[in-house]
Image (cartoon, helix red, strand yellow):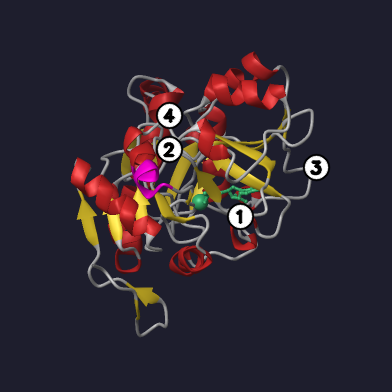
Amino acid sequence: GPVAEAGPSGVSSCPTMEILKPSEENIRRAGEALARGLLVAIPTETVYGLGASAFDVRAVARVFEAKNRPVFDPLIVHVDSLEMVDRVATIPSPRVRALMEGLWPGPLTLILPRREAVPDLVTSGLPTVAVRLPANAIARAVIAAAGLPVAAPSANPFGYLSPTLPEHVARMLGGRVDFIVDGGACPIGVESTILDATKEPFTVLRPGGMPLEAIEELAGPVEVFNRSVARPTSPGQLPSHYAPRTPLYLFPSGGLAEARPVGRAAALLFDPASLAALERSGRAAAFAELRVLAPGGTSLEAAAALFAVLHELDGGGFDAICAERLPEAGLGRAVNDRLYKASEK
Ligand code: AMP
Ligand code: MG
């Protein structure tokens, strides 16, 4: 099987990295690899995760090393069932249990009081741990095959665009991961919503794949972390994150006619109506390329396409990407958060 070796950079490399189609046999292999302390990239409904046994400090250390991730940035622990939560966290109240029962499996990460068994490296020494039960059946099957909770941050170098296709993982972390389980494109396409459930009112720390509306329908009004008034407590809240190498400039919804890009620029538009408006304004010619995120005009579609389109534009040799905000509803909040964090400030 694959063995990690120190490469010229001193970072562990995995010359035998394999991409696994999700057959029963391969899911068993991926689970065994995790249980043996290897790194396995797994598909989830949000983005691809770089998985390691949450109880294996050496494996978790390799995750930080592979991603170049600072150790003050704690990881999300993925479970295959509500029963498995008990191995890493306690459920502080019936209200929190109701959230789990109502919204899991799904793109919602809950911050919960941790159990002692979780290594400090996973939680950055915090008294809490981030836990998620993913909706992706392949992810749950791999975790079940491992028989262990799996710590898995997004499978990208720290600060760069998240991966929503197996090729993104292979390109960005190819030599640093033992296996990639190929689950195709991630249907949600933005990271999970992170909700601090350790105190009331619950607080959204990062908008994501679970819409605020769905949480509030079940839990009543929740606070939303506001970067302009609060200090970041979780690096998903850092202002610069999820960023392409090409400078990205963010405009208000419908505002791309105001852009004055220099050089070869790409316009990232929300929907066909925005494109039509830009064309009517006579300013479309300012862009070398016009891309629409959501041909059907839904925020769900925009979220699913976001990272794949940004990866593609980032490889397209543009001098700038000019993007417009989405309306702040549904997954529009998560897309706007990622665009803001990707943008020049
Ligand atoms: P990633 O999986 O790369 O999207 O990153 C996971 C996010 O969850 C990071 O922004 C972490 O800071 C956040 N996170 C993980 N554990 C905690 C915790 N105990 N409290 C607050 N945020 C957390
Ligand atoms: Mg990440």
Residue behind label 3 places its C-beta within 8 angstroms of ligand 1? no
Viewed as shown, does residue 22 lie left or right of 63?
A: left
Please tell me which of labels 1 and 4 falls first in the chain.
1
The mark closer to the camera, 2 or 3, is: 2
Q: Taken as a whole, is the magenta stretch helix, strand or loop? A: helix
Report the magenta residues as a range.
Answer: 142-147
Please tell me which of labels 3 and 1 falls first in the chain.
1
Amino acid under disc 1: Val
Q: Which residue is mark 3?
A: 229
Q: Is residue 20 above or below residue 57?
A: above
Q: Residues within 10 Å of mark 1 (few under 14, many from 20)?
A: many
Between marks 2 and 4, how big is the CA–CA gap?
20 Å
Please tell me which of labels 4 and 3 falls first in the chain.
3
Residue behind label 4 places its C-beta within 8 angstroms of ligand 2? no
Q: What percent of the width, then of the height, locates residue 260?
A: 49, 45
Amino acid under disc 2: Thr
Which quadrant of the figure has residue 112?
top right
- Indicate which disc residue 118 carries: 1
Q: Kindly indicate whether the residue at mark 3 contacts the one at mark 4 (C-beta within 8 angstroms).
A: no
For the point 31% across and 45% down, which residue is it?
288
Q: Is residue 143 magenta?
A: yes
The mark closer to the camera, 4 or 3, is: 3
Task: Give the total number of marks visible in the rendering.
Answer: 4
Amino acid under disc 4: Phe
Instruction: Report the front residue among 250 and 96.
Output: 96
Which quadrant of the figure has residue 295?
top left
The quadrant of the rendering that contains the N terminus is bottom left
Q: Kindly indicate whether the residue at mark 3 contacts the one at mark 2 (C-beta within 8 angstroms).
A: no
Q: Which residue is mark 2?
A: 46
Q: Which residue is mark 4?
A: 270
